[in-house]
Every structure is written in C-alpha cells, then in structure tokens.
Image (tube, rainbow, N blue to C red):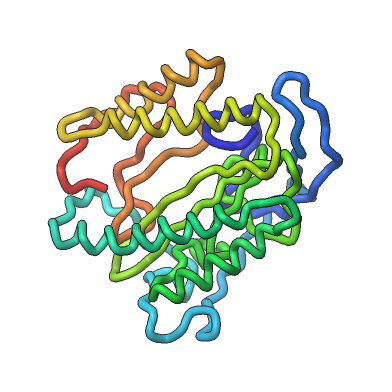
Amino acid sequence: RQTQLRETHTTSAHAYPRIRRRSPPVDPDFGVYHRMTPTTLLAREPQPKEPSLTSIPAHILRPPYARTGTPPEWPTETPILTDAEIEQMREASLVARDALALGGSMVKPGVTTEEIDLEIHRFIVSRNGYPSCLNYMGFPRAICTSVNNVIAHGIPDTRQLVDGDFINIDVTVFKGGFHGDTSATFAVGSVDQKGLDLMRTTKEALEIAIQACGPGVPFSVIGQTIGALAASKGYTVSEELTGHGVGRDFHQNPLIYHHINDEPGVMLPGMA
C-alpha cells in the first residue's frame, strides 16, 4: 500500500517509469488491491520542456526552473520568513488547498489521473498560479498522483482508477514568489478494511505530528511521534523520502525525517 506508512516499493523522482496495471492480486498480508508495476526497471533521464504560453500564460510568474528544468541549489540555511512573507506564502497555500480539494472531488472509478491533472492545472492557472511540479527536474505534469503501492511522485497517465484503489494527490502552487505545498490520500470507491486502517493511521500520524510542532521543539520530535504511532499499529515508516521546508524555493531546509531519528535542529518562528 502507498503512503509513507507502507508495505514496500517506491519510484524514483528522477527515473519517472511508466506504470502498468496488473490484474488485482490477493495479498493476504495487506489486503486486496491493484499493484502498480513499472514497464521497465531501466532508469530514463527526464527531458525538461519549458511550458508553452498556451499551458502557462505570459502574465503568470514562473519559478526559476520553469525554462530549463534545473532547480536552484538548496540554501544552506533554513530561511526565516517575515510576517509579510508568511502572508504571501499563505496566498499560494490557499490556492494549493483549493486545488487539492478539486482533485479529491474527482476521485472515483473510471476517472484517469490525467483528467485530474488537467483540471487542477486549469484551476491553478485560473488563480494566477504556476503548478510547481511542472518541468521541475523535467517532471512532465502539474501534479503528482500516486496510486496504491506507488509511494510518491507518480506521473498522471491514462490509467482509469478502479474500485478499491487509493490515490495520493500532491499539489504545489507557485504564486507571488512563494510555493504552497500540500497533499492528501483519497479512497476510490470501496477500499478494503486493511487499506482503510492504513489511511486512518497515516492521517492520525500527520495530525499528531502537527500538534507536536512549536517554537523550540526539536525537528526529531516529528519522526519520533510518527514512528511511535506506526509501531503501535503494526506499521513501519518509509525511510526513502523526507519532508522538507518550503517557501521561495520548492524544496529547502529543514529536512524532516518521518521515522525515529536523532537529527539535530529545532523549530523557530518563521520557518516553513
């Protein structure tokens, strides 16, 4: 199953393999669902492509990587936002929130992830935003859609969602010089009990980790909080990916580990 509390499998943020669907297997240890498998295990370099003016009108502010696909280097320090910058970031985040809600409303059997991507793309542009994923390191779509055992960074395609799937929709919006980043996992039709339990535990982990945040709190408390809950429910936490800061850059410090860890650093007012 997908989400950061998961069974196994990940896709590379750099390889972008195409995904095919097999017939629905029965996994006695983890429920019944369609397992996504790549058509090839050979990594392919993404091909950056600057968005056209039809896709992204000229009046919309583009992030620095939009033309070449090459993101800027991560800043070595963790930025501290001013009150005015926080308000600017909030504007981008509100568009991302509404775009995510739109995508979630479309989740049902028979809908393709490509259709969800196109609608969210149009919505973001209509709100004078740029879909941050588009051409980031050559990523070809506006959002990430990760189905079942695909843990993150899935590319929207023509596969139709089927009853029993679940899907993570990851939306980031660049507006006013700031990125707003959000994602959520949605059930497609009737998900089996093991899938629902995983989704419920993952959501609970997110909520209690947010509650643990505050000025002066070590970053490691996030991973300790999530890891303890996961273990109590019989799950493990993926160590393949991390959380990250966001602001003027799509990805920036601090790195946030979701598993139990002893990494240094504390939260300060103005971090995002």
Label tally: 0
State whether residue 241 is above or below residue 198: below
Residue 263 shown left or right of residue 106 in the figure: left
Q: Position of residue 35 (x, y in %)?
A: 75, 38
At a point 52% along the width and 29% down the height, the residue shown is: 200
At a point 42% along the width and 86% down the height, the residue shown is: 58
State whether residue 252 is above or below residue 137: above
Q: Position of residue 151 (x, y in %)?
A: 59, 40
Q: Residue furthest right?
A: 23
Specify the quadrant that holds the N terminus. top right
Q: Position of residue 63 (x, y in %)?
A: 38, 70
At a point 41% along the width and 63% down the height, the residue shown is: 173
Q: Quadrant of residue 82?
A: bottom left
State whether residue 73 is above or below residue 125: above
Q: Quadrant of residue 34?
A: top right
At a point 40% along the width and 71% down the height, the residue shown is: 129
State whether residue 201 is above or below residue 161: above
Q: Position of residue 169 (x, y in %)?
A: 55, 51
Q: Nearer the viewer, residue 251 or 150?
A: 150
Residue 228 shown left or right of residue 9 in the figure: left
